[in-house]
Every structure is written in structure tokens, then in C-alpha cells.
Amino acid sequence: EADIYQTPRYLVIGTGKKITLECSQTMGHDKMYWYQQDPGMELHLIHYSYGVNSTEKGDLSSESTVSRIRTEHFPLTLESARPSHTSQYLCASSERLAGNNEQFFGPGTRLTVL
Amino acid sequence: AQSVAQPEDQVNVAEGNPLTVKCTYSVSGNPYLFWYVQYPNRGLQFLLKYITGDNLVKGSYGFEAEFNKSQTSFHLKKPSALVSDSALYFCAVRTLSGNTGKLIFGQGTTLQVKP
């Protein structure tokens, strides 16, 4: 079944640890996105990708980095987690080119940094 | 600057009554407009979109939205609310300029439907 997956769903980790949030989609979409969302709040785009080997910074500055080595995989990495990184992270994907295509979202990863 | 506004943090309606969740936008060029719903501890689910054509758009779960170019609005509506409609709703816009596919989201409106 075509879908978009995120793991882990919940993560509690100590300050200074390196973490990677996984995102995979089986829909064959070229475009992928990472959003940061505080509880009950609006979404802020932090990274996006047009396709393999393409990564761009989003509208909200983030200390995280992303990579796109395979079409279906778009992991987000924090080299040294801090309490200010505590948030929900949502991954999304959409079809290439046509601007009218909706984005499909994963279930999110709720990150807590102690 | 491009922006989307959802003027109400929360909308309360009784089950069976009609509901409206408001959205206004400010963008250059013709907008593509979207509504998403988010249930607790879940990602966003697509409800409907306006691209061109009929100003009244029908979407999932009985929701519809009306595009009004003169008022730059795209309000979400449902004729008869259900308790299960209680969730967080986001309006989003994308313009035709460029092809980044980026969405600009509103701040979200919590819909509370009471039995």
C-alpha cells in the first residue's frame, strides 16, 4: 500500500545526543518536505527536496540537516540535540512538477530533548 | 509577503449544526488553496483543494469550501457537524510562481463539536 512512514513516532533523548528521524514514502513522489510543529501550532517548513541529491532550506531556520540519496528516503539529522529542538516533526511528499498536487503527510515524530 | 490567516483559534458548534472555519490569504498570482485536518498525535490529512473552475469545492468527509477571489477567502464548511469532526484544521496556499511546491500554512483552527 502506498504510504508515507515516519520512525520513531516518539523519542525522548538527552541533550547532546545525535539523532536521526526517518521518513520513507512508497508513492514514488519526487518532492519531499520536513515541517516542524509545536503542539497545536502552525507548521513551519524546515527542509525540502526536489528529488535525489536535492536538498533545500525551508522558511524556518533549523540546526538539522537532511539527505536524499534515494527517492523514497528523506532522513533528518540533529548532530547534537538540545531542549529547544523539542517539537513535532512532520514529513510530507508530493508528486513532481505540478503545483496543484496536495502533499501527503506522515504521522509525525514527537521529539523531546531533556 | 505571502500569508494565510485563520482568524479563529477555536470554533465551537453543536452536533448537527452547520460549521464554518475561516481562511483568508494574501499571495501574488493565482493561488492554489488547500485544507488539511489533523487529529491528535497524527499527521495532516488532505481534505480538499481549489485549483481553478467552480468556486465551490467538495472534499472528503462531507466538507466543502468556497473560494472567493474578491474577498481572498477560502472558508471551510460542512452542513451538519459530527462529534468526530473535532480536530485541528489548517488552511494552506501555494502560488503558481516558481515550482517549489512549498505550502504556506495558516496557524490552525481547533474545531470542537459538542454532542
Image (cartoon, coloured by chain):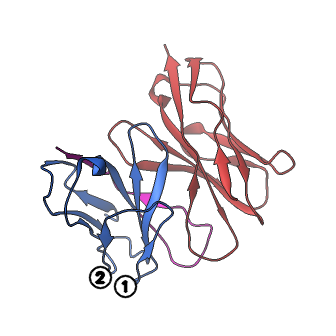
Chain colours: A blue, B red
**Residue located 34% across and 80% down the image:** A71
Residue furthest bottom in the image: A53
**Tag count:** 2
Q: Is residue A101 magenta?
A: yes
How many neighbours does mark 1 have within 10 angstroms: few (below 14), some (14-19), or many (20 or more)?
some
Residue A46, percent from left and from top: 42, 63
**Residue located 76% across and 62% down the image:** B52
For disc 1, the marked residue is A52
**Residue located 38% across and 71% down the image:** A27
**Residue located 35% across and 44% down the image:** B42
- Whether residue B69 sits left or right of residue B40 in the image: it is right
Residue B54, percent from left and from top: 79, 54
For disc 2, the marked residue is A70
Asked whether residue B14 is in view, the answer is yes
Asked whether residue A25 is in view, the answer is no
Mark number displayed over residue B57: none
- Whether residue B63 sits left or right of residue A82 in the image: it is right
Disc nearer the start of the sequence (1/2): 1
| Subunit that carries the residue with mark 2 | A
**SS state under label 1:** loop
Contact (CB < 8 A) between labels 1 and 2? yes
